[in-house]
Image (cartoon, rainbow, N blue to C red):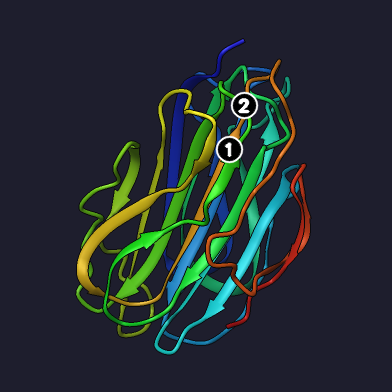
Amino acid sequence: MAISFINVATNQNLTASTSFTFTKPTNATTGDLLIGVVANGRATATDSSYACTGWTPLEDVYYDGAGDDVQMGVFSRVVQAGDPASWTGSSSVSLEYQSIVWCLRGADSTLLASETIETSGTSNSSYTSVTVNNTDSGAWRLGAVVWTDATGGASTGVSGNTFRVNDGALNVTGTDEMMFAACDSNGAIATGNTSITWTVPSGQDEGMTWIGLVAPSAGSATNAPSGAGAATATSNAPKAGVGAKAQVIG
């Protein structure tokens, strides 16, 4: 069965809070796969962790950059009968955030790959994900990026992918703003190594990217990610099908 895109739902909170929301996308039905990403960027160096009851944690990575800090959490869930319209997750630190939930039909609940990596510096004009190896000709590629800068500005391009959200200024606490973008391949991708590069206005600060590969429900559930510039990242919780990492503190 081929994967089909159903919808996305997004949320943001520009007032610091210890909770965040994942909204169930319109037309989601029993058996669909939900992939949720929550991210923040801020000027204060405070590590935090994300949790959301009923969702499987895949990534929870924090990067303490030279100027600003970024963090991203990734979760998955299979829609069940009687599911609520939204779920409230928690953060161990009061933060502003942006979130997105994808709904895919005909998708395997075990991801082929799920990888995050941070980008340092204060003069970035692009952010590139880890390179992962796609082993299923029916797989879709999903990705998200969060970054900070005083001037703001949405991503100006993401070749070979479809934007699902592209927010250029979230006005978070501190001197800088948080930018967030998420995209997917909107169809099956070729097998072999693959990555995502987001082009952004020049002179941007620290950032973090996530890339995930989702196979059709009748496809392979094997994974062979290959790091392109491995982060020192590890993860707080087990990842579905792709092992475990520990949390990044740069």
The reply to whether the C-beta atoms of the residues labelled 2 and 1 are less than 8 Å apart is: yes
Q: Residue at x 66, y 57 (%)?
A: 59
Which of the image's four quarters has the C terminus? bottom right
What mark, if any, has residue 102 been given in the picture? none
What is the x, y in percent for residue 86? 59, 39
Q: Which mark is residue 136?
A: 2
182 to 49, vertically: above or below: above
Residue appearing at x 55%, y 25% in the figure: 104
> Is the residue 29 above or below the residue 202 in the image?
above
Label disc, if present, on residue 213 of the rendered structure: 1
Q: Position of residue 158 (x, y in %)?
A: 30, 46
Looking at the image, residue 138 lies above or below residue 11: above
Q: Which quadrant would residue 105 be assigned to in this image? A: top right
Across and down, in percent, residue 66 comes to: 44, 89
Quarter of the figure that contains the N terminus: top right
Which residue is drawn at the image coordinates 42% and 83% (left, top)?
Answer: 68
Is 57 positioned to the left or the right of 250 in the image? right
Quarter of the figure with residue 80: top right
- The residues bearing labels 2 and 1 have C-alpha atoms spaced at a distance of 9 Å
Which numbered disc, 2 or 1, marks the residue closer to the eye? 2
Residue 158 appears in the picture as rendered: yes
Tell me the kind of residue under disc 2.
Asp
Task: Choose between 137 and 175: the one closer to the eye.
Answer: 137
Q: Secondary structure at mark 2?
A: loop
Q: Is residue 16 visible?
A: no
Dot 1: few (<14), some (14–19), or many (≥20) neighbours within 10 Å? many
Sooner in the amino-acid sequence: mark 2 or mark 1: 2
Residue 116 left/right relative to 185: right
